[in-house]
Image (cartoon, grey):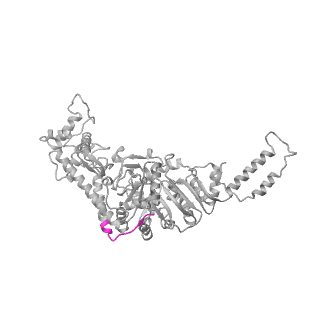
Amino acid sequence: TEIGSILRLEKVDKDLILEFVNDCPPEGQFVMGEVNIEKTQEQLRNIVQVAVLLTQKYDVMVTNPPYLNKFAPKLKKYIWDNYKDYKRDMFSVFIYHNIELCKPNGYSAYMSPFVWMFIKTYEDLRKHIIKTKHISSLIQMEYSAFEEATVPICTFVLQNMRSEEKGNYIKLSDFRGGMEVQRVKTLEALQDSKCGYYYESNQDNFEKLPGSPVAYWASKNIIEAFEKGKQMNSIIEPRQGLATTDNNKFIRLWYEVDHIKITFNVTSTDDSVKKKVKWVPYNKGGAKRQWYGNYDYVVDWSNNGEIIKENVLKKYPYLKTPDFVVKNTDYYFKEAITWGLITTAGFSIRYRKPGSIHDVSGMSAFSKNYDILIYILGLMSTPIADYIFKMLNPTINLQVGDFNNFPVIVSNNKNTVIELAQKNISISEKDWDSFETSWDFLTHPLLDISKQEKIPCTIEQSYSNCKNYYNTSFNKLKSNEEELNRIFIEIYGLEDELTPEVSDKDITITKVFDTKDEIYDDIKGNQYILTKEDVMKSLISYAVGCMFGRYSLDVEGLAYAGGEWDDSKYSTFKPSKDNIILISDEEYFEDDIVNRFVDFVRTTYGKDTLEENLKFIA
């Protein structure tokens, strides 16, 4: 009852055993209650029947195998001893065992999670099926279509033979709306093979891709890219990073700690010891952001991470060293390109300056050759990256192994690619640094000379200049991305599969609209949209920072965020002496927040246009 139908038995001679069982006469037996020969005989006959069921061969096996990966000790040992290559999950064991219970040329049909088709854990199962069986048909459903359980599902039929025939595949991953939608789309595909989501594929092609994923929709050109391209990890070095095992204890947003206790220019772990660092930048992945950004966190790396390492060994006493989670320390603080583990919003990748430790969720790739690093960044910023990664692993977690397997074709246009990528990094970096949440923030964009020829005397004109700057940058970045897309789509021969056009909602820098009503459909969902109201609120936020002395109109960047106070930094606009700002909606005080803000506007834009500016802000 614990091992169930995965029990492996030798072939039994049913007739001989039953002859022995039935030949035992009940006469002369000593009976104690219900323990008697008739009951024993019946139990033995049942056991023989089960043995027959588990050892005979079938024309067809149909099953919805159990989705189970945590086993009781006996079951775990049995699976390890009998199904070692398929031990990751019970459904993997079922897939292997049930097809073995089929007659030659017989069929087995399943409904199971589709992860077996792609991820490394099930690579042995895939290779066994591809080399010795025939995938007759397969339907891959939309990620959450199976309403009974939040499991990404596929249904498929295996034939117990090796065949050169193509298998039939239906890809329903683009059709949301539950099982009824999936049913309708399946029937449509069966009636119209040119529907765009019906495929026929020879499974020999799967072996041409690293890890043998069941990427049935991979075109001839994609397969050729894997054959002639270089594997990513032969060009650069992708590496997992630090897992602190207790982020609440060791990680902070950078503005939660004294700024003077953060060291931004560490070059190696040895350098961190010399500089006696406390907090250093930490790369955790974060929101979808292309080219540059997501500089949000710091990690406590005191004494070369001593307290983190001690905590790991205390938490996992069976480990001899903390290297299992404090890994790849030789790559800490190095220049990198980095991407997030979770890709629900689509794959995005960024340049990361030297000075950070990378997290297990902010995985990174390294190279001493800057040009190669930037070329790879340019390639991986095109739709080709997402397109191929969804073949290697369409789950929401993109692992280092998947990145390693990407086929890289180096173009004759290498210098053009590097130049465009560098421009995009610069555009995105300036955008990131124009907000207070960047530790390299210098001043508010409305007061930033670099974003306009000179600071006008009206905030309305400043806003207009600023809006023009942001939207010009947005359009330039989009244009550069589309040029990179054209270059690489041609290199990979994917003109019939991908388009170079980029949707505005996928450009990950600021675009400004006067009102929400102006936001058009193609950009809806872009988290970097600002309205005029947002810009004014950010100006008020900056002004409050000046009132408290965090910022100063006389110095760039952070004037005070911990450490010793320096009164000489503040002459144009004085911060509050007692570090208190009054807020009142009835009584007005000379130094309340409204009057102080009026002073700020008067100081920055002049008294002649004060009323005009205040009306514009209101």
Q: Is residue 335 left or right of residue 179?
A: left
- 420, 148: nearer the viewer: 148
* Relative image position of residue 409 (x, y in whole percent): 39, 68
- Residue beneath the point at 27% across and 46% down: 559
* Residue 258 visible within the image: yes
- Residue beneath the point at 60% across and 59% down: 99
Tell whether position 75 is magenta: no
- Residue beneath the point at 32% across and 66% down: 487
All told, the count of numbered labels is 0
Q: Is residue 496 left or right of residue 76?
A: left
Q: Is residue 298 left or right of residue 542?
A: right
Tell whether position 415 is magenta: yes
* Relative image position of residue 358 (x, y in whole percent): 41, 55
The residue most toward the left is: 608
* Residue 566 visible within the image: no
Q: Quadrant of residue 413?
A: bottom left
| Highlighted magenta segment, given as a residue range | 405-417
* Relative image position of residue 397 (x, y in whole percent): 45, 54
* Relative image position of residue 199 (x, y in whole percent): 46, 62
- 147, 583: nearer the viewer: 147
Quadrant occupied by the C terminus: top left
Residue 297 to residue 497: above or below: above
The residue most toward the right is: 28
